[in-house]
Amino acid sequence: MPTCQNCNSFVTEGYVRVFAPEGMDAPRVCPHCEDLVRDGSQVREARATRH
């Protein structure tokens, strides 16, 4: 079962296939992460809170 490397939340295999870099089996960040966001092919700190 794949999990996010940042927050350890469950992610689907489809999410991993689309958003994780080639050859990785877990994404670096997911929609549940409050402190990091994807920015193109990179991961960066969130500029604002999500709630």
Image: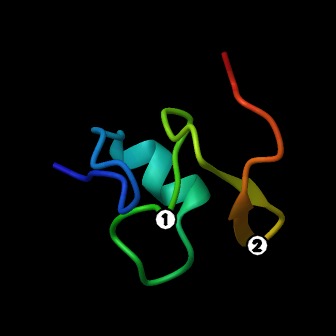
**Label 2 secondary element:** loop
For this orientation, the residue located farthest to the left is: 1
Circle 2 packing at 10 Å, graded few (<14), some (14-19), many (20+), is few
Circle 1 packing at 10 Å, graded few (<14), some (14-19), many (20+), is many
Alpha-carbon distance for marks 2 and 1? 11 Å
Between 40 and 46, the one lying in front of the other is: 46
Residue at left offset 53%, top offset 65%: 20
Residue at left offset 66%, top offset 15%: 51
**What kind of residue is marked 1?**
Arg
Q: Is residue 11 left or right of residue 51?
A: left
The residue identified by callout 2 is 41
Query: Residue 16, percent across and down?
Result: 45, 55
Query: Residue 43, percent across and down?
Result: 68, 67
Which one is earlier in the sequence, the residue at label 2 or at label 1? 1
For this orientation, the residue located farthest to the top is: 51
Q: Is residue 12 left or right of residue 36?
A: left
**Label 1 secondary element:** loop
State whether residue 49 is above or below residue 23.
Answer: above
Q: Is residue 33 left or right of residue 5?
A: right
Residue at left offset 49%, top offset 65%: 28
Q: Is residue 16 left or right of residue 7?
A: right
The residue identified by callout 1 is 28
Q: Are marks 2 and 1 in contact (CB under 8 Å)?
A: no
Query: Residue 12, percent across and down?
Result: 35, 39
Rendered image: mark on residue 44 = none
Between 50 and 30, the one lying in front of the other is: 50
Between 16 and 10, the one lying in front of the other is: 10
**What kind of residue is marked 2?**
Ser
State whether residue 51 is above or below residue 31.
Answer: above
